[in-house]
Structures are given as structure tokens and as C-alpha cells.
Image: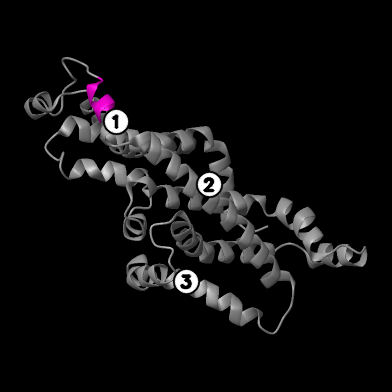
Amino acid sequence: MPDIKDTKSIGARINLFLTYLILLFFTVMAIYPLFWLLLNSFKTTTEFQLNKLGFPRDWTLINYKDSWVRGKFPHLILNSMFYTGITTVVTLVLSFMAGFAFAKIPNKATKLLHGSFIIGLLLTLQSIMVPLFLLINWTGLYNTRLGVLIPYIGIAMPMGIYLGTDYIKSIPNALIESARLDGATYFRIFRSIIIPMALPVGVTLAILTVTGTWNEFMLINILTSSDALKSLPVGVQKFAGALSSDFGKQFAALVIGLVPMLAFYLGFRKEITKGVAAGAVKG
């Protein structure tokens, strides 16, 4: 009779093999579209129509050159960096300040104010686009950078306050009380205690804000009319209109649009993994 331990060992190996096989399948499914996109960005439109799955016969960079110039990508990338950077920094600071107040500074209005922010999580972008456009237009902020930044920050704040408040609640009250007894102001406590201890959830919030703002497309189109204020996704979208039949330039534009986010992930992959893991589990 076969040994029970040997049977369990064989079963464990089979399970491990099947697990890796499934993971490999999903990895290929995720990577292949990017690989296919990259390959076809080096083809001319004629070659792509004749051979959609094969490698390019004549590798060419003309698609990237034309897309870079026609799409005005240098300017659009700078705009995206501007919007994303300011939105992320302001959202982090304001969310943690509000979260600290809601979690550690008792007040009768705390529940009402906290709930008024959190209800923003239930609102979809489509439901507020029209009133938001009318409000921005009425205040004279239409087609301005400030008119873009304020909605971006406002839309990111509900999630930031939700994560910040929930995480800061887990910080022991004894730390806050001892600091108050030593004469520390709330601002000093926020700067010296809350911010360092809330860094894990701060990384999580920064990741969500950076990716959401960088990839945002609808609002920037509604709130601005000048090409000088547009962001990178708008430049990529241009190649789906008048140049919709020029597949080579479309694919090159899509690759250019993907590179910043891929570089962001590759550069901060360890921080992203730690931040998501730490932010998902309080304390």
C-alpha cells in the first residue's frame, strides 16, 4: 500500500502545479495585450492590416515621432504632472487634517460633518458633471487650471477622509493625551505623531489619487476648452478621431500614454505593495 505521507506529498505537488499553471495563464492574459500593442506600434498601418499578430518586418519609429508631435505630448505630460502632483499633495494634507479632527477631537458636529464628506463616496461622476460644470462656469473658473484642480481635489477627498479617519482612530488616545499634557498644540501633534504613524494609509491614498487623477478624462474635457490646459489622456484620445484609420500612430500614442503609469509602478512597486497591504489592515 502506498504511504499516506507520499500520497499527501504528491497531492500537494499537484495542487502547487495547478496553482502556478493558473497564475501563469492569468499573467500571460495580462501581459500579452501590452506586448501586442508594443509590437504593432512599430508597424505601418499597411503592415498592420496585412499582419496583425506577427512581428514587424521593418521596425520603424516614425509612428512615435509623428504621435509625439501631433499629440503635443510634451505639454500634455507636464499638465498631467501638474494636476496629479498638486491634487495628490493637497488631498493627502486635507484628508489627514480632517481625519485627525474627526477621529481625535470630539465635537457635537463631528458625525454630521464626517457623514457629509463620506456621502461623496456614493456619488458617481456622471451624476455631478452637469451641476459641476454649471457651478464652475458661474464662478468664472471655466477653462482655468484652478477650475480643474478644485473638482479633482473635491472628488478625491471623500475617499481620503474615509481612509484617514478610519486609520487614525486606531492610533492610541494615550499618545494624544500625553502630548496635550506636555503642552503640544493640535498642529504639533498632527505633524509629529499623526503624519508619521499614518504613512501606510497615506501611501495607499497617494496611489489611488495619482492613478485616478492621471487617467482622468471626462472632467478635463468638460471643464476646459483650451488645448493648453488639457492632460495626457485627451492627447491619446485625439488619435481615435481624425486619425482612427492610422493604426500605427494610434498604437504609438497608446504606448506613450501607458509608459508613465508603468514607470510609476515599476519605480514604486515595493512601496505600492506595502502601502496597499498596510492600508488594508488597520493597526
Residue type (three-letter) at the residue carrying disc 1: Val
Is residue 176 something one can see in this rendering? Answer: yes
Identify the residue at horizontal 28%, vertical 26% (top origin).
64
Query: Where 269 sits versus 152, above or below?
Result: above
* Of 148 and 111, the residue lying toward us: 148
Assess disc 1: are there few (<14), some (14-19) or many (≥20) residues with their C-alpha within 10 Å of its C-alpha.
Answer: few
User: Which stretch did the figure color magenta?
Assistant: 61-66
**Nearer-N-terminus badge (2/3):** 2
Residue 233 location, quadrant: top left
Q: Secondary structure at mark 2?
A: helix
Residue 105 in percent (x, y) is at: 74, 73
How many numbered circles are shown? 3
Give the labeled residue for mark 2.
85
Is residue 27 something one can see in this rendering? Answer: no
Q: CA distance from mark 2 to mark 1?
A: 24 Å
Assess disc 2: are there few (<14), some (14-19) or many (≥20) residues with their C-alpha within 10 Å of its C-alpha.
Answer: some
Q: CA distance from mark 3 to mark 1?
A: 39 Å
Question: Does the magenta stretch mainly form a helix, a strand or a loop?
Answer: helix
Identify the residue at horizontal 32%, vertical 60% (top origin).
222
Instruction: Inspect the magenta stretch and tell me whether residue 162 lies in it.
Output: no
**Nearer-N-terminus badge (2/1):** 1
Query: Where 125 sits versus 268, above or below?
Result: below
Residue found at the far right of this picture: 182
Give the labeled residue for mark 1.
69
Give the labeled residue for mark 3.
120
Identify the residue at horizontal 61%, vertical 52% (top origin).
202
Residue type (three-letter) at the residue carrying disc 3: Gly
Residue 215 in percent (x, y) is at: 38, 48
Q: Secondary structure at mark 3?
A: helix
Residue type (three-letter) at the residue carrying disc 2: Gly
